[in-house]
Amino acid sequence: MFLLLILLQAAAIITAPAPGDAVTGSVNITGTATHPQLTRYEVAFAYDPNPTDTWFELQPPSTNSVTDGVLEDPRRCDFDASSLIGTVTACGELTADDARVIQMIWGGLRGSDGSFLWYGLAQGAPLNALAGPSPFIIGLNHLRFWVKRDPAFDWKTLDYESLEATFHESHELFNDVIGTDDPDLSDFRKAGGKAIVWHGWNDQLIFPEGTIDYYDRVIREFHDTRQVQKFARLFMAPGVEHCGGGVGPNVFDAFGALVRWVERRDAPDRIVASRIEGGNVVRTRPLCPYPSAARYDGKGDPNSADSFVCGPNLGAVPKKP
């Protein structure tokens, strides 16, 4: 059974079904609309009794795109590293084993039976920080000093089964102590708190899909994206690396947006980010409150934030654990 929520981007009158109607099977949607591009209309649906704002298209969406070397949402990218086999790089020719390792890094940590444990790096993020010739020192020291409590522990002795066991051991030992993933923000909301969370899609140290995972759980806790966005908003920054830098527009004032939200009750519907080269702004792009994403209007200057709107992230296919 589905609970239909009619959410349209332009002036429209839907005569059937009515908002909130529970329907099953194929559904005919009737009504009138003033927008000439019918592919821009979407309908939200949710499984009863816990609605979420999940989108699907009535028709394939328009494909206005910008080629700028930045992935708006890497989850929409189905690139396979095996297509690069034979490519000559500064480190030598890329082999089938290299491609397999890259795919595994993108796919995230898996159990010995292939089950999902946690997310990996997003496509587009640099691989050498976590997956270079030497392990990331914070992860290595956590393993040695916290989990194994053995400064001489050799990480190279791990196989897939022992890695999985170590993952669960770490969670069991420390999640109650240093875990910060409780989705129940009721007290924060009741106190009048406001939160802006942002994460760069090209973060090479902390997996961005982990942040999305947490925010999605907050939404499930409150049963409604709109209710959560009244006090907490997540902004994903395409092409931005850990705490800044990267190929995307990476200069923006999230703190200023938070101050305006708190002091003026001006909730941020977009935060404009800039890319600066040689002291000059060469590109601006809006960062949009999740789950929306920046969509090019197909006609304006692709280097200007004014040519983009924040709308449903059509075509996004989140990785399924």
Image (tube, rainbow, N blue to C red):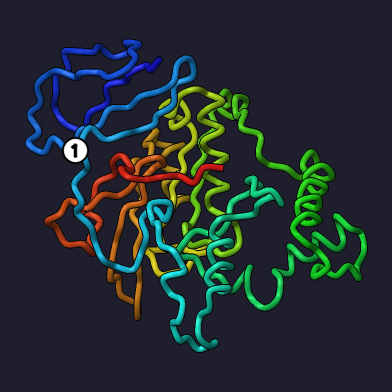
Q: Is residue 160 above or below residue 221?
A: below
Front in this rendered view, residue 223 or 226: 223
Relative to residue 59, is residue 313 drawn left or right?
Answer: right
Q: Is residue 204 above or below residue 33?
A: below
Q: Is residue 122 visible?
A: yes
> Counting other residues with Cα less than 10 Å from the Cα at mark 1, is it few (<14), some (14-19), or many (20 or more)?
some
Residue 173: image x %, image y %?
A: 84, 44
Q: Is residue 251 visible?
A: no
Relative to residue 87, is residue 179 drawn left or right?
Answer: right
Relative to residue 211, is residue 47 drawn left or right?
Answer: left
Relative to residue 256, is residue 172 drawn left or right?
Answer: right
Front in this rendered view, residue 94 or 279: 94
Residue 43: image x %, image y %?
A: 27, 27
If the image is split into quadrants, where does the C terminus sit? top right
Q: Give the residue displayed 41% in from the left and 45% down from the top.
A: 317
Q: Which picture quadrant has residue 109?
A: bottom right
Q: Which picture quadrant has residue 60?
A: top left
Q: Give the residue displayed 70% in from the left and 76% down from the top.
A: 134
Q: Give the residue displayed 46% in from the left and 62% down from the top.
A: 123
Q: Which picture quadrant has residue 19?
A: top left
Q: Give the residue displayed 52% in from the left and 23% down from the top.
A: 222
Front in this rendered view, residue 104 or 311: 104
User: Given the image, on which type of amino acid does mark 1 rest?
Assistant: Arg
Residue 130: image x %, image y %?
A: 63, 68
Residue 193: image x %, image y %?
A: 54, 32
Q: Is residue 171 above or below residue 90?
A: above
Circle 1 — which element? helix
If the image is split into quadrants, where does the N terminus sit? top left
According to the picture, the residue beneath numbered tag 1 turns out to be 40
